[in-house]
Image (spheres, rainbow, N blue to C red):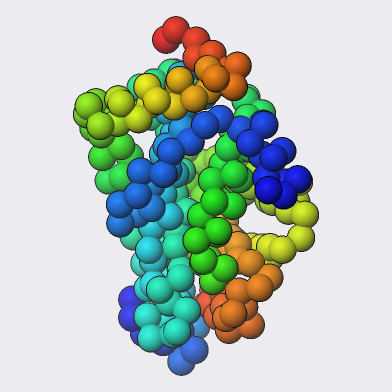
């Protein structure tokens, strides 16, 4: 995907865009799985707890799940 | 502090910049839905050799799927996302966000409409948006958008690169 798009042929551009989108989809799928895992870590739990406290100070109360 | 910034603070949820390679931001809604926003460095989208390549980021929005089965409309969410985007652009006027709407559930056009509406609603000047739709050979449509600041030092080159990439591909 490192071809200069100024000199790409229309077909190369199509392939490049296809590759960009497929890379994005793959990355997003991996990032989603990673996010789900990280939400269970003490680090993320602590951050979300602090965010709940910050929201509460603004009068936003998080409802029970 | 600008008036616009105060409005976002008042109407958005608290968020945290968690950092990392993908510039991660986190927030949680009143109904307990957890979000992660990423600005993933994506220099390959245009041309890695371009001077602006290091400022190209893909905007990625993740929702914790098991947090709540029903995601209800929440007017604070768009405020929060826009507030996060503004915070990210504060780091560097030359930053550029590319977004490719999620097509996994076939609702990519609805997402694009919502995102475009947010841009029109929240942009009080200072930002440029470009959008295009890419139709893949299998018929799947992918809305693609780009947001950059008016005062981006590479504005002309980036706008040209986007237009060049999305408008002249083989559409047969």
Q: Is residue A43 above or below residue A6?
A: above
- Given residues B109 and A34, the one toward you in this image is A34
Count of numbered circles in the view: 0
Give the residue drawn at x 67%, y 31%: B10
Is residue A29 in view from this perspective?
A: no
- Given residues B109 and B2, the one toward you in this image is B2
Give the residue drawn at x 72%, y 38%: B7
Residue B1: percent from the left, percent from the top? 68, 48
Give the residue drawn at x 33%, y 76%: A1
Residue B169: percent from the left, percent from the top? 53, 77
Quarter holding the C terminus of chain B? bottom right
Give the residue drawn at x 52%, y 31%: B14
Horizontal arrangement in the rendering, residue B119 relative to residue B35 (left or right): right
Is residue A41 in view from this perspective?
A: yes
Q: Is residue A64 above or below residue B36?
A: above
Q: Quadrant of residue B171?
A: bottom right
């Amino acid at each position: 995907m490192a071809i200069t798009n100024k000199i790409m042929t229309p077909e190369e551009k199509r392939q490049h865009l296809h590759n960009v989108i497929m890379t994005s989809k793959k990355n997003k799928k991996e990032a989603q799985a990673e996010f789900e895992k990280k939400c269970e870590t003490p680090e993320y739990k602590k951050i979300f707890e602090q965010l709940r406290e910050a929201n509460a100070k603004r009068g936003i109360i998080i409802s029970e799940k | 502090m600008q008036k616009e910034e105060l409005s976002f603070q008042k109407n958005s949820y608290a968020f945290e910049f968690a950092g990392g390679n993908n510039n991660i931001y986190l927030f949680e809604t009143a109904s307990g839905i957890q979000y992660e926003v990423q600005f993933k460095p994506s220099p390959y989208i245009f041309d890695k050799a371009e001077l602006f390549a290091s400022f190209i980021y893909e905007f990625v929005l993740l929702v914790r799927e098991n947090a709540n089965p029903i995601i209800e409309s929440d007017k604070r969410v768009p405020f929060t996302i826009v507030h996060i985007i503004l915070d990210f652009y504060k780091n560097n006027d030359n930053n550029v966000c590319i977004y490719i709407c999620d097509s996994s559930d076939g609702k990519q056009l609805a997402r694009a409409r919502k995102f475009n509406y947010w841009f029109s609603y929240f942009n009080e000047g200072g930002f440029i948006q470009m959008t295009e739709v890419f139709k893949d050979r299998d018929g799947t449509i992918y809305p693609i958008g780009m947001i950059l600041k008016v005062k981006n030092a590479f504005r002309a080159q980036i706008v040209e690169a986007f237009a060049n990439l999305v408008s002249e591909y083989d559409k047969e």
